Image (spheres, rainbow, N blue to C red):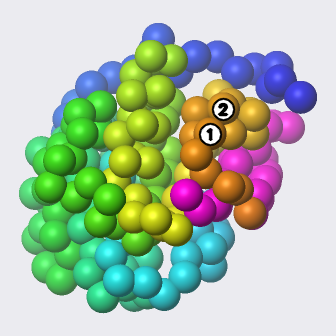
Amino acid sequence: MPRKNAIRKWEVKMPPNEWYRKEDPWNIKDNEYEKKKAEIIWTMLDYDDILLDVGCGEGHFTNKYSSKFSLTIACDISNRAIERARKSYQHIAFFPHDIREPIENFKGKIGTIVCSEVLYYFNPTEQKRVAKNIVSLLKPGGKLVVCVSRYFTEKDIKDLFPEIRWTKTYREYDKRLGDDYTLILGGYV
Ligand SMILES: C[S@@+](CC[C@H](N)C(=O)[O-])C[C@H]1O[C@@H](n2cnc3c(N)ncnc32)[C@H](O)[C@@H]1O
């Protein structure tokens, strides 16, 4: 079912570095709903060698996910967020990167990728490019977990990532979103 209030967020977006003028701009560290989403994502992750968290922000949830991986790497377009993440979580390799561009060094090498609350920054053409970049990083059989609040239907995500065989879908309701919800999908390439 198309979501009624699926406005297009990129029309109202602010550049990510502006958001990070203040620390923890989405209050993810203390907000129960945000923590619940991260918990769901964490339960969907299998123990694996390498995790890549795309759009990791200040790395608070990357840190939680990292407990299941031998090596965790994470990127974000915001230099401010990456600097803070590096100071807080030194066991994770954070690097600035715009995921609209490919990450050549890691192509076909990543076992697990998390992309949480990032896709709505992009217009439809960019979304396709980002999805292609993400899938190109996964090794055969690699796992992808995508989380989106509003703006996307399950079909939107499935259309964006035709290479992924989706095995799990969660809908998490939050009173701040009215009758809308967050979607979390997990699957394998
Ligand atoms: C709403 S936050 C989500 C943070 C975290 N993934 C979570 O689930 O709480 C969106 C993040 O995506 C990052 N981002 C936006 N555009 C990006 C791009 N083109 N490449 C990489 N990261 C991007 C922002 O800087 C921000 O840290």
Would you say residue 100 sits in the magenta stretch? no
Marks 1 and 2 close (CB-CB < 8 Å): yes
Tell me if residue 139 comes above or below residue 64 in the rendering.
above
**Residue 96 location (% of width, % of height):** 14, 48
Callout 1: few (<14), some (14-19), or many (20+) C-alpha neighbours within 10 Å? few
- Quadrant where the image shows the N terminus: top right
Which mark, residue 50? none
| Residue sitting farthest toward the front | 140
* Left or right position of 173 against 27: right
Q: Mark 1: which secondary structure?
A: loop
Would you say residue 183 sits in the magenta stretch? yes
Callout 2: few (<14), some (14-19), or many (20+) C-alpha neighbours within 10 Å? few
Say which residue appears at 40% left-offset and 59% top-offset.
138
Residue wearing tag 1: 162
Count up the numbered dots: 2
Range shown magenta = 168-189
Question: In the image, what residue type sits under mark 2?
Answer: Asp
* Left or right position of 132 against 85: right
Does residue 1 appear anywhere in the picture?
Answer: yes
**Residue 61 location (% of width, % of height):** 41, 68
* Left or right position of 39 against 154: left
Quadrant of the image occupied by residue 87: bottom left
Q: Mark 2: which secondary structure?
A: helix
* Left or right position of 129 against 101: right
- The alpha-carbon separation of the residues under discs 1 and 2 comes to 6 Å
Nearer the observer, 75 or 19: 75
Say which residue appears at 63% left-offset and 61% top-offset.
187
Quadrant of the image occupied by residue 43: bottom right
Nearer the observer, 110 or 115: 110
Residue wearing tag 2: 159
**Residue 67 location (% of width, % of height):** 40, 87
